[in-house]
Image (cartoon, grey):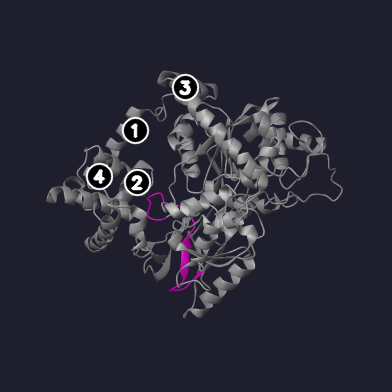
Amino acid sequence: MTQFEALTILKTGANVFLTGEPGSGKTHTVNEYVAYLNSCGVEPAITASTGIASTHIGGMTIHSWCGIGIRSTLTPYDLDTIAGNRKVVSRVGSAHVLIIDEVSMLSAQTLAMADAVCREVRRSSAPFGGLQVVFVGDFFQLPPVSSAFEGRSQGSEKEVPDDLPSLDFDSGDRAVQDKSSIFAFSSSSWRKADPLVCYLSEQHRQEDETFLEFLTAVRKGEVAERHKVLLRTRYKKTAEPGVTQLYSHNANVDHINTGELAKLSGQPKVFVMTGSGPDPLVLALKRGCLSPEVLSLKLGARVMFTKNDPAGRFMNGTTGTISEFNKETGSPVVRIDSGRSIVAEPMEWNIQDGGKVLAQVEQIPLRLAWAITVHKSQGMSLDSAHMDLGSAFEYGQGYVAISRVRTLKGLSLSGLNARALEVHPKVFAEDKRFRASSDSAREKFRDLAGDELVELHTNFIRAIGGKPGVGKPVHTKKEKVDTLAVTKTLALKKLSLQEIAKERGITVGTVISHLEKLVEAKALDPVKDVPHLSPDPDRLAEIKRAFNKVLAKTKEMKLTPTRELLDNSFSFEELRLARLFLNENKKESR
């Protein structure tokens, strides 16, 4: 299913499970849906299973949102207490759409408790009290943490009393939950919500066909000897200079980062996080933020951006080196691995509820990046990484780590155990059902006429108190042409790729996709119309030489083999852009 098809289904108000492989655009699709709801005057409740994930999306943990805190079970007394909390009643009672990100890390028990609170507060027996629920995540990634500690990392204040009764809730039935059913999809709350599955099939991170085939084999539990042979070609005892290292445990990461920073000469420049709002919420933000509360940097330090830049200059996972500190502001200047220099100005992370900012923190969006944990890497895209998965201890841990990297060329391994490539048997079995369900949903909505979809979208917005037609119009094929026209207009005004991306609220990669479609439709001549978007002449010449070598062998200007001939400073986006200009130059020379 494409992102466009998933968005069409989301807009109907149906409960949805939005899933797909790493890099398939789950976060982008959710952001598009949130923007659509906001433009119609609707503020969705945006939550996540962990503090880190909630900080990424500007929401709060599901534990905090529904008031369950660190509880691992709910008693009737607990439920009455929560239903008497004015803040919980206000946000749960006024909500219309509930988004739960990184649902793979949410246990069935916690999902059932959230469901029970929603039904109690909203005085409705419908699943989640009648809210549209959007589950987002990939169950092949990191599994739920132990329920005893699941909420503890969320910054909750309350401690669970030793004598807390252990009567569990499961979709309203006061019965003890089967402890072997850890995944959210095992909960009867999930089954009663009956979400339509939107399994995204597009790939926006990996374009290396061999690498993609390997990752697919891991998901299918079909890792064969040829795949192990492939991985052996990536074995290296130590990381190459400048390559981020991934480890399973914090101790390894802290040891490496502290040691490498100490090797650099000079005194560190320290940046301290600031915050405003209630102390418990600020503390939760600090714990969930990938940038540390106290960030110590030196010239030459390897760093990683921890947030996406609205202008598209960097994204969560972009790596580089501190080249200087701005003389006027003192902000660090990062020379990223593609060669560009970026001043890293402070950015904000916040917790919102109904569009209102409850608390916020501000810090330079960087962290030391000689090493990071696999857990903190979830959601990142890396050009290269070195990892030791010899101590992998969870299903999905190895898959998460390896799938952070865009190409096989960017991967190096110093250790790998059997668990690292294993997927949970229950997830493997359920995934087949998810895929089939997604195909069924796709066909069902394809059969609907355009006016039927418009009516469904309009009726849902009206039902939840929004204003149909005020926001973004329903996507149609005509709108796809229009959105290309908007990009073309901005490009003809001589805006840069980053400026176009910022103006449109999209990524640079999406801008390039628009340019490719415009050129294909003969609606734009890059050489004549937008020469200012051409890559640097020296880099373009180097890319051309690489493309020509590939062209001689394959008769096509393929991206992956071309990038294999270049160093890591060349991104796929740069190659895609270069290909546009090189193709047009060829046509002119004929």
**Going from the N terminus, do you reach mark 4 or mark 1 first?**
1
How many angstroms separate mark 1 from mark 2 (CA)? 16 Å
Mark 2, residue position: 501
Looking at this view, is 144 or 391 the one in front? 391
How many angstroms separate mark 3 from mark 2 (CA)? 29 Å
Looking at this view, is 144 or 162 the one in front? 144
| Dominant secondary-structure state across the stretch colored magenta | loop
Residue 454 percent coordinates (x, y) = 43, 21
**Going from the N terminus, do you reach mark 4 or mark 3 first?**
3
Mark 1, residue position: 480
Report if residue 231 lies within the magenta region.
no
The residue segment tinted magenta is: 295-314
| Secondary structure at numbered mark 4 | helix
How many angstroms separate mark 2 from mark 4 (CA)? 10 Å
| Circle nearer the viewer, 4 or 1 | 1
Mark 3, residue position: 458
| Secondary structure at numbered mark 2 | helix
Residue kind at label 2, given as amino acid type: Ala
Residue kind at label 3, given as amino acid type: Thr
Mark 4, residue position: 491
Question: Which residue is at 67% across, 31% downward?
Answer: 191
**Going from the N terminus, do you reach mark 3 or mark 2 first?**
3
Q: Is residue 54 above or below residue 480?
A: below
| Secondary structure at numbered mark 3 | helix
